[in-house]
Image (cartoon, helix red, strand yellow):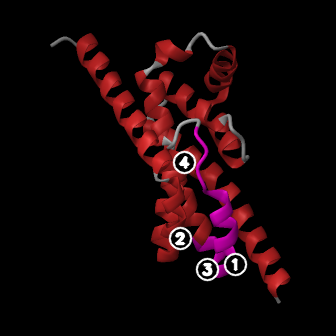
Amino acid sequence: MNSKTRLTLARIAALIVVVGLTVFIFINRDKASTLAAYGYPGIFLLAFVAYATVLLPAPGLAVVFTMGAVFNPFGVALAAAAGAALGEISGYLTGFSGQAVIENLQLYQRMSEWMKKNGRLTVLVLAAVPNPVFDLAGVTAGALKMPLVKFLFWCFLGQLIKMLLFAFVGSTSLKTFFN
C-alpha cells in the first residue's frame, strides 16, 4: 500500500471517528451536565464532551461558570481547559481528514492565511475568546498539518485563559449573589 492510499484511509478513518463522536455527543447532550457532580474529573470529561463536537452546540462554559463557585476556580479552569483542548482534537482531525472539503471556503482561506503567518498566536487567541470560529481554527490547523502537540499546547493555554475567566467570574458572582 503506497503512502497516498494510507493517507486517504487515515483521513477517512479520522472523519468517521469525528462524525460518530459528534453524533453520539449531540444525542446525549442532555445527560452531559451530570458529569459535573463527579468533581474535577467530571468537569474534565464534560469539557472534553462539549468541545469534541464540531460545529454543534454543547454545554461547557456554563458548567465552568457554576462549578467555579463550588470548587476551587483554578482547579476547575485547569480541568476544563485540559478537557477542552483534548476535545478540540476532533476539529483538528476533521481538517486532517477533509481538507479538500473546506479549502474553498472564504473563511477557511482567511483562517489559513492567519495560521500560516502565526499559527501559535492564532490558536491561542481564538481558544481564549468564546467564539464559534474556533472549530474552523482546529480544522485549519489539521488541514495545514500543524504538529498536533503544538496545536494542543497553544489550544490548552488559550482555553486556560478563557476557563480561568469564567471560573473566577462564576465564583465571585455566584458567591456574592447567594450570600
- Does the CB distance between marks 2 and 1 fall below 8 Å? no
Density class for disc 3 (Cα within 10 Å; few <14, some 14-19, many ≥20) is some
Looking at the rendered structure, the secondary structure element under dot 2 is helix
Which is the main secondary structure of the residues drawn in magenta? helix
First in sequence: mark 4 or mark 2?
2
| Residue situated in front as seen by the camera: 123 or 166 | 166
Left or right position of 6 against 98: left
Density class for disc 2 (Cα within 10 Å; few <14, some 14-19, many ≥20) is some
Tell me the CA gap for discs 3 and 2: 11 Å
| Residue situated in front as seen by the camera: 21 or 118 | 21
In this rendering, is residue 42 above or below 103? below
First in sequence: mark 4 or mark 3?
4
First in sequence: mark 1 or mark 4?
4
Left or right position of 80 against 142: right
What is the tally of numbered marks visible in this picture?
4
Residue tagged by mark 1? 69
Residue 145 in sight here: no
Q: Position of residue 116 (x, y in %)?
A: 61, 22
> Which corner quadrant holds the N terminus?
top left
Q: Position of residue 146 (x, y in %)?
A: 49, 29
Image mark for residue 36: 2
State the image quarter where residue 14 is shown: top left
Q: Point out the stretch of residues depicted in magenta.
A: 56-75
**Residue at the farthest left position:** 1
Residue tagged by mark 4? 51
Q: Position of residue 44 (x, y in %)?
A: 49, 63
Identified at 49% across, 22% down, the residue is 143
Looking at the rendered structure, the secondary structure element under dot 4 is helix
Identified at 84% across, 81% down, the residue is 177
Residue tagged by mark 3? 71
In this rendering, is residue 96 above or below 75? above
- Does the CB distance between marks 3 and 2 fall below 8 Å? no
